[in-house]
Amino acid sequence: MAQLAAATLCLLVLAGCHKAVPPAPPPLNVDTVEAVVQTVPIFGEWVATLDGMVDAQIQPQVSGYVISQDYKEGSEVHKGQVLFEIDPRSWQATEDQASGSLAQAKAQYKLATVNVNRDTPLVEALAYAQSSLDTEIGTQEADKASVESAEATLESARLNVEFTKVRSLIDGVAGQAEIQVGNLVSTTSQLVEVSQLNPIKVYFFISEQEYMSLSARARAAGKSDLLSTGDKLPLKLTLADNLVFSSIGHVISVDRALSTQTGSIRLAASFANPHNLLRPSQFGKVSAQTDVMKNAILVPEQAVNELQGAYQVVVVGADDIAHIRPVTLGPSVGTNTVILSGIKGGDQIVTEGVDKIKEGMKVMPHRVASSTPPQGQKTEGN
């Protein structure tokens, strides 16, 4: 029995000695690019809301029933053009009554003047009482005042008749009517809104740091502030379809103060809008160059891995060993990201499969060409 156990043990030992050792896995194939050093323009990009340069709320100045709408909704209208007509009959009657009252007042004033002119020589000849003449002069002055009051009343009545034709206050595009023909309107009724769309106004908020940076660029261009930069600080507008609008804008107003809730300040820009393509309440993005970063280290965005709020890249050394480096990110520049610290120019950075690589792993790098933005390309702020 002991001999059988010894034989079995010997066979097990011999089998273990001949067991095959699995081969080591081949190095992981990775694409790498060189971290490039370049001077790049930095652009800020902000959400923008469009509004008319002037938005006129058209309200009637007299009450009455609307008898006609004299414009096509959504069409261009001109200052002074009649948009609506209110029934003028009651206002015309008031004007006629005021005209009659003026004629009566003039007649009374004329009679009073005749009396004063007739009796003045008699008083000088002591043939008429001075007190009676004084009364006639007082009556004349009162009648003159009545004439002036009646003239003002008539002018007011004429204006009210004119106001039954509701006119546009500006050149612009008239929106949809908020009332219908036959509605009874008053001076508080809103009939339509007319907006001046060329140029159009664009509102956007920027941070305090961005405001200071843009102001510094304005001063560097020889301007006193943002309002006087003109074409020295060109603004681009990107629409909802991601197309850049053809016109270049410029800042036309800066709000009085920063918002205490957000720490940002509102700016308004003006963009030429010759075909009225842009309309109020549209959204877009305004961008402008805020800075120039010299000796910026650029890597592709996909090379950066985020882990629990921290960022890292994988650097491949000359021995093809991968090293994970924590980095500090700067602004985005096109499809690249500026690295503020953690790597240096010329490092070989892994662009794909960063999350699969462990520290000290052997890899097989395949170098690909770097993709760097040309000078002046529009980029997005961080």
Image (spheres, rainbow, N blue to C red):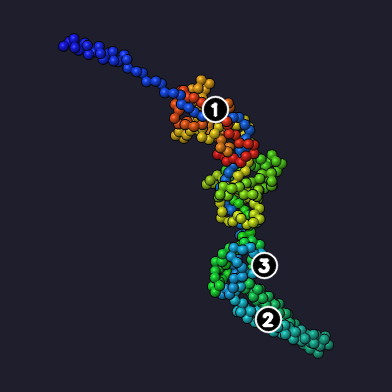
Residue at the spot 61% in from the left edge and 55% down from the top edge = 277
Marks 3 and 1, the one that precedes in the sequence? 3
- According to the picture, the residue beneath numbered tag 3 turns out to be 80
Helix, strand or loop under label 3 = loop
> Eyeballing the image, is 159 above or below 334?
below
Helix, strand or loop under label 2 = helix
Instruction: Report x, y in % for residue 145.
Output: 71, 78
The crowd level at tag 1 (other Cα within 10 Å; few <14, some 14-19, many 20+) is some
Instruction: Report x, y in % for residue 301.
Output: 53, 35
Residue at the spot 47% in from the left edge and 31% down from the top edge = 353
Q: How far apart are marks 2 and 1 (CA)?
A: 95 Å
Residue 174 or residue 310, whichever sits in front = 174
Instruction: Report x, y in % for residue 143.
Output: 71, 81
Inspect the image, locate mark 2, and give the three-letter code of the amino acid beneath it.
Answer: Ser
Marks 2 and 1, the one that precedes in the sequence? 2
Mark 2 vs mark 3, foreground winner is 3
Residue at the spot 54% in from the left edge and 74% down from the top edge = 182
Inspect the image, locate mark 3, and give the three-letter code of the amino acid beneath it.
Answer: Gly
- According to the picture, the residue beneath numbered tag 2 turns out to be 99
Residue 67 or residue 150, whichever sits in front = 67
The crowd level at tag 2 (other Cα within 10 Å; few <14, some 14-19, many 20+) is some
- According to the picture, the residue beneath numbered tag 1 turns out to be 367
Marks 2 and 3, the one that precedes in the sequence? 3
Instruction: Report x, y in % for residue 294.
Output: 63, 32
Location of the N terminus (image quadrant): top left
Inspect the image, locate mark 1, and give the three-letter code of the amino acid beneath it.
Answer: Arg
User: In the displayed structure, does residue 115 sit left or right of residue 66?
Assistant: right
Q: Distance between the residues labelled 2 and 3?
A: 26 Å
Residue 348 or residue 230, whichever sits in front = 348
Residue at the spot 66% in from the left edge and 44% down from the top edge = 233
> Eyeballing the image, is 368 above or below 135?
above
